[in-house]
Amino acid sequence: MDNSAEMTAIVGATVIDGNGGTPIHDSVILVKDERIVAVGDTSLEIPKQASRIPASGKFAVPGLMTACSYLTDCVSTTMLIRYEGRYDEVAIEAAQLTLKGGVTTVFDGWGPRDALIKARDRINQGHVPASRIYLAGYMVGVDGPFSRGMVPQYRVAVPEPFAARVDSIFQLNIGQVLTRLAPERVREEVRNYVNSGIDFLTYSLVDHLAFEFIAFSPRVQRLIVEEAHRAKLPVLGGAVTTGEALALGLDAGLDIVTVSTHLPLSLTNETLELVAKRRMPFTCRFETAETVEWYRSRGNTASLAYVEAGLATSRQLLGASAVPLLAAPGKVSTEDELTVQTAASPPVRGYGVLGDSHFYQLLAMRDFGMTPMDVLMAATKNVAVAYHVDKDLGTLERGKIADLVVLDGNPLADVEHYRSIHLVMKGGRIIDREALPTQRLITAPRQA
Amino acid sequence: MDNSAEMTAIVGATVIDGNGGTPIHDSVILVKDERIVAVGDTSLEIPKQASRIPASGKFAVPGLMTACSYLTDCVSTTMLIRYEGRYDEVAIEAAQLTLKGGVTTVFDGWGPRDALIKARDRINQGHVPASRIYLAGYMVGVDGPFSRGMVPQYRVAVPEPFAARVDSIFQLNIGQVLTRLAPERVREEVRNYVNSGIDFLTYSLVDHLAFEFIAFSPRVQRLIVEEAHRAKLPVLGGAVTTGEALALGLDAGLDIVTVSTHLPLSLTNETLELVAKRRMPFTCRFETAETVEWYRSRGNTASLAYVEAGLATSRQLLGASAVPLLAAPGKVSTEDELTVQTAASPPVRGYGVLGDSHFYQLLAMRDFGMTPMDVLMAATKNVAVAYHVDKDLGTLERGKIADLVVLDGNPLADVEHYRSIHLVMKGGRIIDREALPTQRLITAPRQA
Amino acid sequence: MDNSAEMTAIVGATVIDGNGGTPIHDSVILVKDERIVAVGDTSLEIPKQASRIPASGKFAVPGLMTACSYLTDCVSTTMLIRYEGRYDEVAIEAAQLTLKGGVTTVFDGWGPRDALIKARDRINQGHVPASRIYLAGYMVGVDGPFSRGMVPQYRVAVPEPFAARVDSIFQLNIGQVLTRLAPERVREEVRNYVNSGIDFLTYSLVDHLAFEFIAFSPRVQRLIVEEAHRAKLPVLGGAVTTGEALALGLDAGLDIVTVSTHLPLSLTNETLELVAKRRMPFTCRFETAETVEWYRSRGNTASLAYVEAGLATSRQLLGASAVPLLAAPGKVSTEDELTVQTAASPPVRGYGVLGDSHFYQLLAMRDFGMTPMDVLMAATKNVAVAYHVDKDLGTLERGKIADLVVLDGNPLADVEHYRSIHLVMKGGRIIDREALPTQRLITAPRQA
Amino acid sequence: MDNSAEMTAIVGATVIDGNGGTPIHDSVILVKDERIVAVGDTSLEIPKQASRIPASGKFAVPGLMTACSYLTDCVSTTMLIRYEGRYDEVAIEAAQLTLKGGVTTVFDGWGPRDALIKARDRINQGHVPASRIYLAGYMVGVDGPFSRGMVPQYRVAVPEPFAARVDSIFQLNIGQVLTRLAPERVREEVRNYVNSGIDFLTYSLVDHLAFEFIAFSPRVQRLIVEEAHRAKLPVLGGAVTTGEALALGLDAGLDIVTVSTHLPLSLTNETLELVAKRRMPFTCRFETAETVEWYRSRGNTASLAYVEAGLATSRQLLGASAVPLLAAPGKVSTEDELTVQTAASPPVRGYGVLGDSHFYQLLAMRDFGMTPMDVLMAATKNVAVAYHVDKDLGTLERGKIADLVVLDGNPLADVEHYRSIHLVMKGGRIIDREALPTQRLITAPRQA
């Protein structure tokens, strides 16, 4: 058997490998099957049979990784109705749009478990090109799309059996009911859940009504984390909104937190020390200075407060050596939804549009004060480390899976250059970006 | 060219021709192409080339006609979202279900005009088997599905551009805005509308918020009717809910009225005399005694009041020689909708389910005190006369279009026998009832 | 008996008598008991025993009359709860505030009948100083404060028996139920109502949900007007919002209309001719140019459209020789209500505050293009004529009731001068304006 | 000075002193000033100057104490509007109604602090006869009456400044905002609060939206309790609704808990052991068997579940040696409120009506399986012990404050006999029960 066709050399690019060191100019990246077999300078010998991809003057970075995205919109009645039974296809469409944007790996922290598993497996089996998916399923402690904590006002518009069915497909048996169960019963449910095919676990630190109360007692939080860890799954804590919620999550041992708060967190020294000691990875919705100004100029004090609270909190965490990770907020929207969303959003390209929003987040991280290298690592290696997948992903190094993006411009010179994608490779295969998404559901143009 | 294959003889049935006279036993009905060429007793000679359909012991009646049905559900968010752009197919599915139940002609008094035109034309051109459709489009004076008078509470659950688009597809430019226009501007809009391909015109007698106010001034009502009549279209007055509304509609010259009222109408002698003089055709939702009792036993006073008001009003109208016409209430529902609907409905077979509901209405008319022959005529000839299509439809007579139903049981003996369908012929063609609906949208079983 | 104390002479003022003619300089107005016994120049002999009121350099005008005010707020939950059983006192407080502002007569077109009768009678009997009240009670065809057409959202905040009781105190038996009754039954109810102590009748031309439908059929409108006229009561038509509503009201014979519309009326030539022929009196909420600009600058398109529609409609009516009458919009508000109201109102002194709002309306009429003399007559004689009380009120003439206002500045020179009140006389008595209101309920300062 | 008038002897009653021992027949209770100076049998010498109250055949028990009542309705818009600035008078009216029912001491766990302090002080100073009040003010962690966790739907019916003012009068600065503050900031606020004149502290164990989340982190709960204890105030934990909430409250060291839950609590052995060890005092809404049956027969599954959950939970707690305390649920209602309430309540005398509801609770405790002696102690000594006021209150013993009730019937024979009040003495003074309430606000009959 001759594997020669499977060997590829990317030749001439400047490699920024994700480890934070000096880039390698005039590099060679040698890929065999799905892995990188060598990264070096021009002295590296390129096997004859390798196909060569010329990349002189270009820049190779690890495939981007978003630490928290939602591939499946959990609240769009249109989506829920129109694609019932096909949520896996919806997730794949989303993962194709992210891949098109250079994101080779997506951590989906909140969605319909079984549909996401189906999507993940189809992608992993090579049936469809799309971002690699790691999924948590639904968030432990929260009820389904039509429940009181989500969009109960939509419930009246659909038949009750549909609402009940959708709720149960999402929340399964790990919803808000767990707040009422005895610890050992919670353990059973969580144990079943962590063994049901998910890749990491998300649990809710706070309630989903006021976002100010604590969802689980300390001992219950600890057992949730224990059960996930016993199954070797990392744990994401959903929606830190108060200092006490963060403190309890840290005590419980969670691995990553999402910050989303309407008021700056009141953090104690004790908490800040723990954040520092753990170099706590966190995701947050960053915003550029222009966006903040836009909210301010519109007199939308509620939105402004939310934006500023998020930034102030992130600044506190960063000051305590917490590690920011790239999030790709937003969702894939229909034409109609996009119209509504655009009208309410700052005039920023792709704001809140999955597949595009990560570019904006990268800019916002820069505006936030991070160095271009920190931004790169927040979008690659640090995500891999936080989720314990750095053995395979996150850097351009020998032995790693060959997920990479070749850019026309230098992202260390200007973060805008992440948009200048020349080529995306995932698992050693060059992606035909023009063909994505291969099947349009949500993004199909509306028939006249 | 030999047309012999197009000649059919139905032999041996008792013919109840719809004119109210004595049935013909051991009859022969001779059909050529789409028309009846002869109806007679056994002495009638059957051409050799005619194919013979034996029907001894059976009963032939004209194809049933419903004077007011809605083939397209205007308020189901599920339907509106899932089948956007395909409402014509939804209408065809409905018309196939009615045809399956022996209804060869449906008058659709309220729906999406262009989709219904498309459905009607496809059916008329013979592309799909389904009930013959006569359509009014939307009701003049009423706004679309998501408007305040319909189901505004659903609006929040869909993107605003979708709601706006659906509203405009339904209401076109003949909605509530007409109440604010000067008479001559109303005339223009109505004139355009009556020339847009509809078969009759429905206009709203009352508001759609409290159902107690008057939608249009007398002079505007008159011009609406004038414009329809000028285009040779009959006029249906929507939802008589008060005595004054009926009086004004009669003055304006409308041809048929729908009664749907929460309180018995207060009718003046003047109005009753006009009803009598015109032998005013009307539709109403009849109910059997069991149903009334069911509502009473449940303590559901609001529903009971509505049911009793409808019956009391119908009784008044009947007493004044008004002519009741068969309506087929309800809609085609998804499995989910059916679950909800069934839970709230009296335990009557097919209650409120289009395609089935007309059987119940026939029984309810009998309970209401009509003779079996009156019931038959309310479902056939009287509908044809009211809508001015009796030249072609409504009876089994030479020259009429061959729309007929052959029953196993005698409907003059027992109204239940309308369900004992042996054969449905529409336009001279025998319908393969088992194949209906040919394409399931709304009624497709839900995927597991 | 010596009547000398009852004779008063106002000496030296310029009299603008309300008839539109040339003012009389250096006048003498002689008042005996409650009537004017003479108006003349300095040649008029002043009886010795008369008390003299020097008014040189000042301007005497008839007491102001507002054609449509609501002394009792029908929607304030605070008022309805706090003063249950004392609505008459609330009305008196309001009528004292209007009197303080120079309004000697108020036509109350919509309120709690029995409380208003009690207030009127106490005022007429001389128990309390306050504007003379003519009252319609509640508006025929409209339901009470907590009903669907008013503020149903407040219903949940009060015990149902209270809501039901308040509704019935207001709407009595002439509410929306009349839309469902046969004409003769409506006649009975209206007849009872016009004989229950009211001074004029208000009926609703349109629904109170969308304000676009017609409340009563033409024949019912005619009989409502007939019954009022039979009892010698003038009829006010409430809330003209569409051209057809106005046309029907004119046909029915109503005497005065209130214009309040979100869209400019579409009026036919026929209607405009009838308006002209009748010189139809109407009230409207006028606005100054600054107010229109304020609404425009705030981007509040809904309010702007409403304001502009009212003005456009008034302009049409004025062009057709309709006769504008002064309205005093707004209500007496608590400190809390005022805070809310002020935040939402244009920065105009006393905007929407009863007792003050008529000054603004007078200015707005001027901005609207009326001459100062037209403005004066709109606030005096024309109101009296429209309501058929010009035998006693509306002008400064011999024989009339001595209702008058003496101003420091000339209102024909500047409409602002209506605020420069030197003295208010009502029924021959000088009002102690400083003492008003004599008992504060709504306007009492809140206790710390 | 002759103090003889201040000495009273109640002679001949059977004394049930509240300690659980054998009653003393033919007793003498000697009261001087406000205290009991002796309790004994007939051998006890009665000073000559003592006034004698004959009580042969009657039964003397300690004045009843309710461990959790709300003297001021926090959600009635009617009350809040009508009596703004007079909430202290409302509280006094309520405390007079409870005193009339034999309750000499009320622990008010949730209300407007300053008004309650004013009421308490006026009562203590002897200005008005009423139950002795111990008050907590508002519940720490919960926002005011119009906030999202209370009755936000009423907010729209009142002017916003009123709603904001009422909210702040109730919640002061210890509302839901504390969930977002850093622990030391919470400590400051709580410290200020415990020193503001309250008698005990209530804090919220759970959220007030879903009643399933945890209001404060363990460390914050501990410091709340610490601050109260430092000020020698007992702590009541509000609304145990989940097992974890109870566990955390126990850990924090609270003194008494209120149980109010829609689902039976899931309690761990650890929690049950702690309950047992502490002999945790708790209040709960008990129900008689008839009431449970009434809810069941009405098919009101939500209410039934709530009632059954409360009982099941109480049974668990009782099984773990927790100590039930009498609560007096309900409020003082207007005639209108009573109409609404009665329609929704089981047909039980005084159900949910403050001043009467404790009689029903006593019966319900009996039905729950408690012995008459346990019931007596739950309503007297055990309340005093739980709140650390047993030095002065709770039993009929020498040195205690002379709060007592003389009954015609034996409450150990039949709990119904608590209604057979012959005499109420509070602080040594005989109460003129017929005169109560001395000033009617809420309970004033409505004026015709």
Image: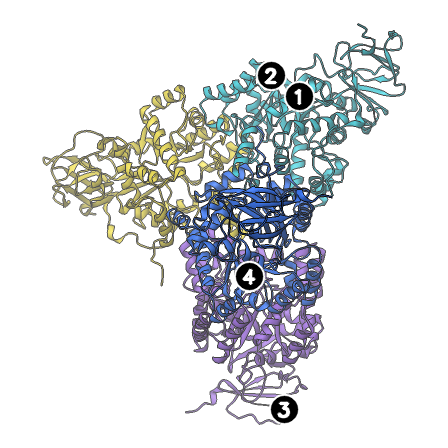
Chain colours: A purple, B yellow, C cyan, D blue
Do the residues indicated by labels 3 and 2 lie within the same chain of the protein? Answer: no
Q: Nearer the viewer, mark 3 or mark 2?
A: 2
- Amino acid tagged 2: Leu
Q: Is residue D174 shown left or right of residue D100?
A: right
Q: Nearer the viewer, mark 1 or mark 2?
A: 1
Judging from the image, what secondary structure is the residue with disc 1 in? helix
Residue D355 in view, yes or no? yes
Task: Report crowding for label 3: few under 14, some 14 to 19, many 20 or more residues within 10 A (C-alpha).
Answer: some
Task: Report crowding for label 1: few under 14, some 14 to 19, many 20 or more residues within 10 A (C-alpha).
Answer: many
- CA–CA distance in space, label 3 to label 4: 52 Å
Judging from the image, what secondary structure is the residue with disc 2 in? loop
Q: Which residue bears the numbered disc 2?
A: C233
Task: Report crowding for label 2: few under 14, some 14 to 19, many 20 or more residues within 10 A (C-alpha).
Answer: many
Q: Which residue bears the numbered disc 1?
A: C120
Foreground: C252 or A55? Answer: C252
Residue A41 shows which numbered tag?
A: 3
